[in-house]
Amino acid sequence: MLKRHFLAGALLCCVAAPWAAPLPAFDCGDIAVAFYEHGALYYRDGNGQWAGIDKDIVDELGRRLGCRFHASVDSRVRIWTNLKGGTLPMSVSGIATPERLQFARFLPYFTSRNYVLLQKNSKPAVHDLASFLAEPDYKVAVIKSFKHGPTYDAWLAQLRQQGRVYETADYGSLIRLFKLGRVQAVLALNTSLAPLSRQRDLADGVKILDWAPKDVIVGGLVLSRQLIPEATAEQFEQALRAMREDGTLRAIYSRHVGAELAAGMFNF
């Protein structure tokens, strides 16, 4: 019997897609999964309940495979620390790096891109990465441990050398710094733009700019090599492939970001 893993948290309910037939019976047991709040990927709805693309993906995997997922919400820094330390079996919407591949498997289920949110009252001369760098008083905020793609990561490396990057623990702190005017820019995935546009105190004071149009972010399930057996990872991969082929992934994306953005989330 597969080893069972627990974390404190509520048991996730399974959201069934009526058109999706389950895979053959496979009991992957109890698996702890850590989420983090980030735009349309994971957020609280109007009733204060957790919702989002990541939650729906995990719920559907549970329905298809019989997994009993136990959810917790944590900072991205602690999530990566626990995955590396072998105390957390699974997380979501992670980006693979050579270091992370040493302790985790990544199963892609969406692609996205980062945009720059720039204060609307910023100097007109600031119109790209180089011109932002040329303003020594301009700062940017990012979530600690996030990867943003090769173009933005190289730009951030230069800004860090100059002490111009604020590292925040979570998405909420990032947006608060921006609203307070402590930084002139933040980076946000396109899956976060629709929720941000609904914040009236933010939408009127921001310019959304595409300064790295060729960068693509591939997000996926993050499975601990130490705690998740390879056979279970293979079942997850098969289930995700089936969800893509039968339209379940597109339906989940459309529900949270709309059909137009959802159509571009399959470049993996």
Image (tube, grey):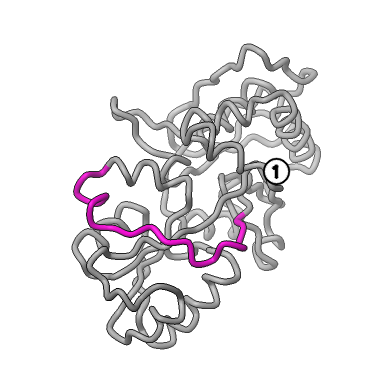
Element type at marker 1? loop
In the displayed structure, does residue 35 sit left or right of residue 138?
A: right
Residue that numbered label 1 is attached to: 228
Quadrant placement of the N terminus: top right
Q: Is residue 203 magenta?
A: yes
Seen at 75% across and 42% down, the residue is 229
Total numbered labels placed on residues in the image: 1
Q: Is residue 265 magenta?
A: no
- Count residues near mark 1 (Cα–Cα under 10 Å), then give few for <14, some for 14-19, many for 20+: many
Nearer the observer, 87 or 249: 249
Seen at 23% across and 57% down, the residue is 205
Q: x, y (%) of residue 261?
A: 53, 40
In the displayed structure, does residue 236 sit left or right of residue 204?
A: right
Q: x, y (%) of residue 187?
A: 42, 62
Q: Is residue 187 above or below residue 231?
A: below
Q: x, y (%) of residue 55?
A: 50, 33
Seen at 36% across and 84% down, the residue is 163
Segment tinted magenta in the rendering: 199-217
